[in-house]
Amino acid sequence: MGSLSGIIQRPLVAAAAVIVASVSADVSEKFSSLRSLVRGSESEQIAALVSGSVQDQRSMWVSQISDSKLKDFSFISRIRLPLPNVDLLIAPNPSCNCKLATSVTSLSALRSAYQSAELAKASAKPAAFTIGASLVVPDVSYKWHLPESNALDLSGSSSCASEKNRTVVVLLGWLGSKQKHLKKYADWYTSRGYHVITFTLPMNEIMSYQVGGKAEKNVESLVSHLADWLDEEHQQKNLVFHTFSNTGWLTYGAILEKFQKQDSSLMASVKGCIVDSAPVAAADPTVWASGFSAAFLKKNSVATRGSCEPNMGGINFPEPKPAATETALLLVLEKFFGVILNLPKVNRRLADVVDTLSSSQPRCPQLYIYSSADRVIPAGQVESFIVEQRKAGHEVRACNFISSPHVDHFRSNPELYTAELNHFMDKFVLASCNHSS
């Protein structure tokens, strides 16, 4: 599998140069030096596609874009590779009545499990240990969170608590997410006695992705230490994956691939999978463009707004529309990914990971949390994948949040979200909690 950085970086520079040139001659001159970096038919192919589309749309929105709005495109000149992980691979239910207390055999055993999160290249072990604390391993993109002290039952009288203490929930973040964004999810799990790992891939690592680079090494390090933790103390331990958006879902697929190659028995340790705001299994340029636009623009993106429900008088409010700058950005990205996703190496790699997620998942329960108002991941795509997973014999649960935006279901409706998680974890994932409830 060769490096894709050269293949992808040159077309992106061409796309950026062409779209900006079509809007402003001054900006075109500014990017003339970038155009000189583009070589061969790859540049001509993407330039023709993007330029043609822009000319068609120019009369509709270019005249509405002011000089100040064009400043929002300044990031284009810095983008090297807007492709997430493709070569890594990258009605409420009643809550459970089981006790939330957990048990641990000893403080030393818990310390051992905690310290197992260290990377091989991190030579020094943590000097201090505090239950409920978190460990950030230097120079990596994941963080280990311990169960909160008030969730521990040191008497060891609860089999459910004991099983939770032997379970790590791995949170795989969405495109552009940071550790702080996953903290509220980690806090919910640790308050119930679970260990948690929060994993994110910074945007700059995704943009400059190279085979064997930092992003890939971080995924490999996570896989290696999960395997080491599972092998410690020769007792049964559990993994649960909680993924966010297509980026987290594809990262999960990359991890499963590495499990299968390293030791296929690791797959049996995966006891559950929770998929938040995903998946779209097809290589759809529109979906990829929407995801990157939302990551770039953040709260300024229309993707962060849910649907408008009728008020008490039954009046329907119009759905929010993207601003002119977001419309332009979506147009560029959709044309760009229309080419990139069809490059043989990219298409083949992505197909391999999606195939793992479609036909080679562990035989464990799955929970899909999605919304009809999601402007990045269409609800119909999620529901189609759910149907296929059920046909394949998987135990699948699903909850449509109807009006909440992309990866915002927890904030929009925390009661329903946590009720779904509680019910799924205690009734379907952890056998001892189901029996004790």
Image (cartoon, helix red, strand yellow):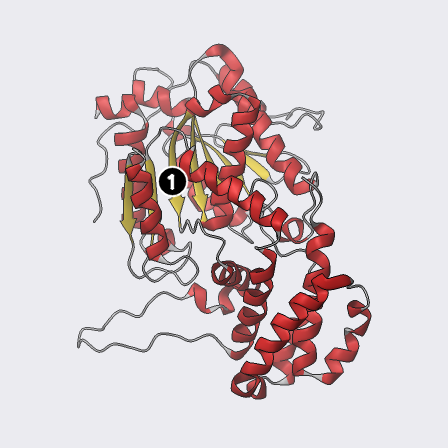
Q: Is residue 307 above or below residue 92?
A: below
Image quadrant in which the N terminus is located: top right
Residue 376 as seen in the image, left or right of residue 224: left
Observer-nearest of 126 and 121: 121
The residue type indicated by label 1 comes to Ile
Q: Is residue 84 above or below residue 272?
A: below
Would residue 311 be visible to someone looking at this image?
A: yes
Image quadrant in which the C terminus is located: top left
> Residue 215: which quarter of the image?
top right
Q: Which residue is mark 1?
A: 274
- Residue 111 on image: x %, y %: 54, 20
- Residue 152 on image: x %, y %: 38, 25
| Residue at 20% from the left image edge and 40% from the top image edge | 94
- Residue 294 on image: x %, y %: 51, 62
Q: Is residue 244 above or below residue 45?
A: above
Would residue 78 be visible to someone looking at this image?
A: no
Observer-nearest of 205 and 392: 392
| Residue at 74% from the left image edge and 78% from the top image edge | 28
Q: Secondary structure at mark 1?
A: strand
| Residue at 22% from the left image edge and 73% from the top image edge | 311
Instruction: Specify the farthest residue to the left.
Output: 313
Observer-nearest of 278 and 197: 278
